[in-house]
Amino acid sequence: MPPAELLHLAELALSGHVSPQLTEEILRAVVEDSNSRAGVLRLGEEVRASWPRSVSRQVEDATAGWTEIPFGADGSQWRLRLLMPERLDQSALGAARIALRAVELRDELKRTRFDERFRLWELETIRSIANDIGGILEVDRLARELINHLVALLGVRSAAVYLGSDPATAEVVGSFGPLTLTADQLARAWEQCVYTDDVLALPLESKDGTLGVLVAASKEARAGTEPFAGNDVRVMELFAVQVTMAIEFARLTQASLERERLKRELEVAAEIQSHLHPQVYPEFPGFRLAARSSPSRQVAGDTYDVLVNDRWLMAIVADVSGKGVGAGMIAAGIHASVRLLSETESSLTGVASRINTYLVGATEDNRFVTFAMVRLDADGGLVAVNAGHCPLLIRRSDGRVEQIPSCGLPLGILAAAGYRESTGRLEPGDLMLLFTDGLTEAENPDEEEFGIHRVERVVAELVSPTAQSACRELLRAVDEHAGGKPLQDDATLLVVERLTGGP
Amino acid sequence: MNEEQIHLTADVLTNGVGLITAAGYINNEGGQAIADAAGDLMERGCGTLLIDLEGTRIINSIGVSILLEIMEKLLEEKGRLAFCSLTPTISKTFEIMGLVQYATIYPDQQAARADLEGHASG
């Protein structure tokens, strides 16, 4: 009969209460039962227990008299070595064999459970990238979080995410541990998976091409490192897909937010610009005004203004080359300059020259401003400066149309440019029209411009020639010409009407 | 702080509680350092171990398996294992890997010590 202690240990093992010392206790019981001098228990080549504990590999090799008993069953790898056993009770050995097999199965179960949980961990990590990390919009922070997950999941000592338009200029946006990818490996990984014992690198492939490379290196084992396995490649591939999606999502969302921000800024700029234009036309006895301005974009390069004092009324129209925010900023500068200079400069050519000098020094070479300015006194006497602008039109009360053409270069081209004043008179019932080329250059579907001659004809044919009707009829004619298409350029129209019943 | 290296402290608190603070990567080296510190505290009579993971953001499977071994060893000695200051990611990992079944998780060291040291003395 096997000794009671071995039976008890077998029962313990079978019940699942396996302590780390159980293997040693089984060996000790066998050594004592067989009255051996010592015993060693191996699983495969690994020594799992020695009794007495002082029996080292060297002691074992240096001692004669060992009896080795194949101790396995059902494919088990246990080997029992006893030193000079005096008796071998088969039933005791059987009990020990059962106990050890239970220990082995228990270990296998533990490993299987660990592996099962580890697979769940893998899935949870991949899921968390989609759910949790996917909400991170800063690419650098996103990359760092992803790297932390990758390091944990693959159990590697280093990992990195490279992002860029090509391998030569790609930059590391997140890393852990020392970087181990060579320039050559990075270039290869940009195209396809690089898979060596120590390095695993995958391209982050989006529909628009490769975004970058995900790399992991030095896979850990219980002691030191071990080669990457096929399962690691599978996990990395899943990871790379999630990383690509997360990075693309972050980039697209950022771009969308940036567009929204710019849109809001443009709306604010457009609102500010619209407030620069007169909201209510200042009163100047004997005259009436009307104006229309339509930007081709939110912020226009056109500007206009009307200033009055007790002696005169001044009407200004300017058109900055180009469109959008840059042109709008210069237009705002022109607007402010005219307001300030008109208080101190007695001549219109002085105003034009000073703005010209400022613009030549302050703007890019390809920026210029066409500029028209008219000053009218209470008797209708007028002085005008036209710097490279569309002709100013005077529509006489009998329907004739006269032009005040440009008398110099646009502002901002040449510091030495000179400007000349034109003079004339606006009689009661006459209209003065200032407009920008957005009006005359409006094209019909055959790409034919509206042109100055059509402006003159519409104005000449006005049935009821007032400032309001001139604006309305001109814009209607332009819109009809363009076939309802939006204008390609900013268009501004300012009309001054000298009233017939005025002073 | 270099996250790739583990930074440890080990202290014997009152009433048989041992405290290990671990900051850095819990991999094979980091895990083994914690296991060594745990073994040392157990030899010094600590039946309850509190592992504070403030500053630890990454743990791999080998690190988890070493922590499981520490837990088994403690349970064998009728001891108790507790963790505190876990990041949400590590907390989730411990949950999936089965560590929370036998170890107690506290939000921070203060809460852990209030419970463990008070509990041990009671």
Image: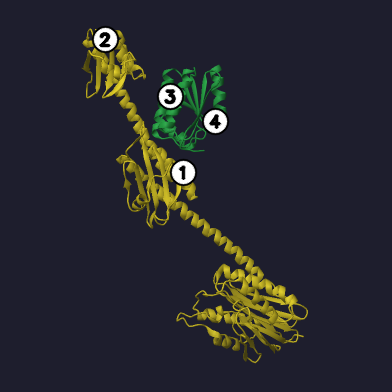
Chain colours: A yellow, B green
**Which residue lies under the disc numbered 2?**
A36
Q: How crowded is mark 4: few (under 14 residues within 10 Å), some or many (20 or more)?
A: some
Q: Residue at coordinates 55% horizontally, 28% vertically from top-left?
A: B109
Picture quadrant of residue A406: bottom right
Residue kind at label 3, given as amino acid type: Met
The label shown at residue A145 is 1
Q: Residue at coordinates 46% horizontally, 79% vertically from top-left?
A: A445
Q: Is residue A244 above or below residue A17?
A: below
Cα separation between marks 4 and 3? 20 Å
Q: Residue at coordinates 74% horizontally, 86% vertically from top-left?
A: A501
**Which residue lies under the disc numbered 4?**
B108
Cα separation between marks 2 and 3? 35 Å
Q: Is mark 2 on a helix, strand or loop?
A: loop
Labels 2 & 1 near each other (Cβ < 8 A): no
Picture quadrant of residue A232: top left
Q: Is mark 1 on a helix, strand or loop?
A: helix
Q: Tag 2, which chain?
A: A
